[in-house]
Amino acid sequence: MRKNWTIKEDCKLLTLVRQHFSALVSHNRLNATMPFSQQLHDAFDSPDRDAAALLYRLEQAKILGFASRPGGDPTKQLFRCLINNDLALYDYSLTFPTLRKALHPDTVAAALNHFTNSNPHESLSNTINEIAKALHLSSMQIEKLLIDSGQITINSYRKCERVGEITINNNLQDLISRQIPDITLVEDINACRAQVSQLYHVHERDGAEVIFSSDGTGFGKSYGVIQGYVEYLECFAKKQKSDDLFPEGGFTNLLFMSPQNHKSTWIAARKTKFWLLAANSFAFSLVRILPISTLWTGPRA
């Protein structure tokens, strides 16, 4: 005798479809004998449901539709996927009959009361699981209830989040965007920084030097050292002879250290230009750029 589908089975099948959605939508037509269907059946791992039963259940959820006239051998019945966006699987706009079934009003009220009194700083998934356990429901039933009641929503990462969190995140983005300076101001500051940075150019020195500076941040110290080195290479590349191997003075290496990771990132982004200069001019090496903290081998605070 055919067994009725349970909420546990539907939740398990929905989880599998979410996980393998990209493979599902890649098939124009699907029947129970195809590898995807067999893999889905193996993952479902139930002696009560064969591969055909799973596909027919997906049709009842309106995730699949019949691609040929129903009837005949169930294993030969063709299906096609009706959706191309898996968001419907997470916000329960398309779902299985047991999940569509309305809950008793008292159960809904109790779930909402639990959610209202829950700790907003606790993981939302933990809160949902706790409510489900207290009311003897599945976590998906609680998710759907909270989504339908406007308490939570599904974000672009297919994760549940409280509706209030969206407002907080949007306000934070607005605050950040308001504090970003106008592009013309940034360009003016960078122009001034480029001029000041010439104080730190080293390419006209006779040999290697160590420069100590107590100037504050933003004065162009890093920019001056690196840009000066680039200009030094460019200057040599313009007047080099075809048989020259090294720049005059033999200065081919640059070692830069900084306690700030973003400085290393900024410089590393410009290594491409160094390599282009080297490829077109002479044999040259750039010492790997590391923050000073990576060179410290003693105890850390």
Image (cartoon, helix red, strand yellow):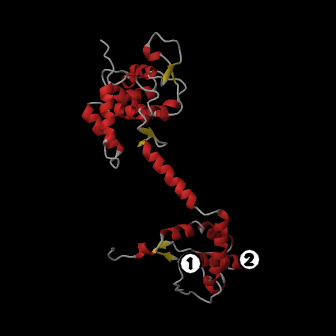
Q: Secondary structure at mark 1?
A: loop
Q: Which residue is mark 2?
A: 238
Residue drawn at x 36%, y 21% is: 50
Residue furthest to the top: 72
Q: Are marks 2 and 1 in contact (CB under 8 Å)?
A: no
Residue 121 position (above or below residue 59): below
Q: Give x and y (percent) for residue 31.
A: 47, 21
Name the amino acid, label 1: Leu
Residue furthest to the bottom: 206
Name the amino acid, label 2: Lys
Q: Quadrant of the C terminus?
A: bottom left
Decide which of 239, 162 is in the foreground and name it. 162
Q: Quadrant of the N terminus?
A: top left
Q: Tell me the distance, in whole angstroms, between the alpha carbons under discs 2 and 1.
A: 20 Å
Q: Give x and y (percent) for residue 288.
A: 51, 72
How many numbered marks have been drawn onto this rendered protein structure? 2
Residue drawn at x 52%, y 71% is: 263
Q: Is residue 31 visible?
A: yes
Q: Is residue 282 visible?
A: no
